[in-house]
Amino acid sequence: MTARAAAAWLVGLAVASAAPGARGETAAGLVERVRGMTAQTRDRTMHLTLRVQGATGELVRSLRGYEKRTADGWHVLWVFESPGDVAGTAFLAQLRRGRPDALWAYFPAVGRVRQLPVQRQMRLQGSDFTYEDLRLLAFDYEAQHRLEGEAVCGDSTCHIVETTFPVGTFAYDRLRSWIRADTLIPQRIEFFEGNLSKVMHVLRAGHVQGVPTILALRMETPDASHRTIVEFDEVAYDTGLADTLFSSARLDVAGR
């Protein structure tokens, strides 16, 4: 996949916060609390570095991201800074509950804004992420959940949750998630397409304006022969982003 799907999946990767879970909590209740984690913030800005590592070496992309909550979902704007062949490329996504998502892009070489088809299984810049991962990493979906138990997660305890999807809903048939009891940040998520397909690890997390926030993560194949590392910095919440920033008619301006 080219950078065209950048806006879609990245929005679900960086925010997580909540109070510690109660004893005897159900899997459904835990997932509902994870889903509600971003309700306390209205918008977010950040800088991201994307590193794709495989047999042919490393590919690095730098970009800035802007997100804003809406009545029925959220808007996301991503602007690539480097390398030179993608600098100025901009993407705008409208992620909507109950309606199809919409995606636009501005490519400097073409000089105009295009609306793009949303293809959930397209890969981002040859990375290990797809558009479909947006909903999954944000726990924004309907499925059956089952608590498998608990495990030690560094200095905390993780709830292990197995999620089974209705047939045909996603390319994956199930997930297994390790969710920290103290922050509700997913520490690890395994993706299954029959067999194990890929694994996400949270590498670093911290507090930004009092909000527990993922600051680095890695998605990799089961044998770790191909991996993608995403690093977040300059994260800020509730800066008052204007609605006009997320206009498809102004996407060419955002990319300059």
Image (cartoon, grey):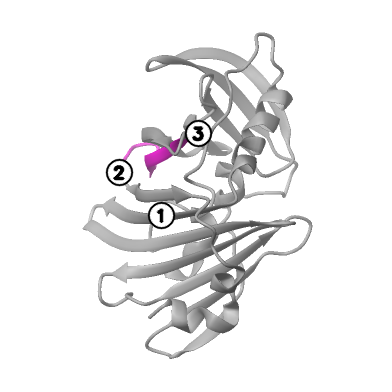
**Residue drawn where x is 37% and y is 41% of the image:** 215
Q: Nearer the viewer, residue 163 or 243?
A: 243
The verdict on residue 158 being magenta is no
Q: Callout 3: helix, strand or loop?
A: strand
Could you say whether the residue bearing mark 2 is in a helix, strand or loop?
loop
The label nearer to you, 1 versus 2, is 1
**Circle 3 is placed at which residue position?**
189
Q: Is residue 124 visible from the viewing direction of this image? A: no
Q: Residue at x 27, y 60 (%)?
A: 60
Residue named by callout 2: 225
User: Which part of the image, by quadrant, shows the C terminus?
Assistant: bottom left
Which amino acid does the dot numbered 1 rest on? Met
Gap in Å between the C-alphas at discs 2 and 3? 18 Å
**Quadrant location of the N terminus in the rendered image:** bottom left
Principal SS element in the magenta part? Answer: strand
Q: Amino acid at mark 2?
A: Ser
Looking at this rendering, what residue extends furthest in the bottom direction?
A: 111
Q: Which residues are magenta?
A: 212-224
Could you tell me which residue is drawn at 36 percent across and 63 percent down? 63
Toward the viewer: 175 or 178?
178
Q: Which mark is residue 46?
A: 1
> Mark 2 Cα within 10 Å, few/some/many (few <14, many 20+)?
few
The residues bearing labels 1 and 2 have C-alpha atoms spaced at a distance of 29 Å
- Quick check: marks 3 and 1 in contact, CB under 8 Å? no
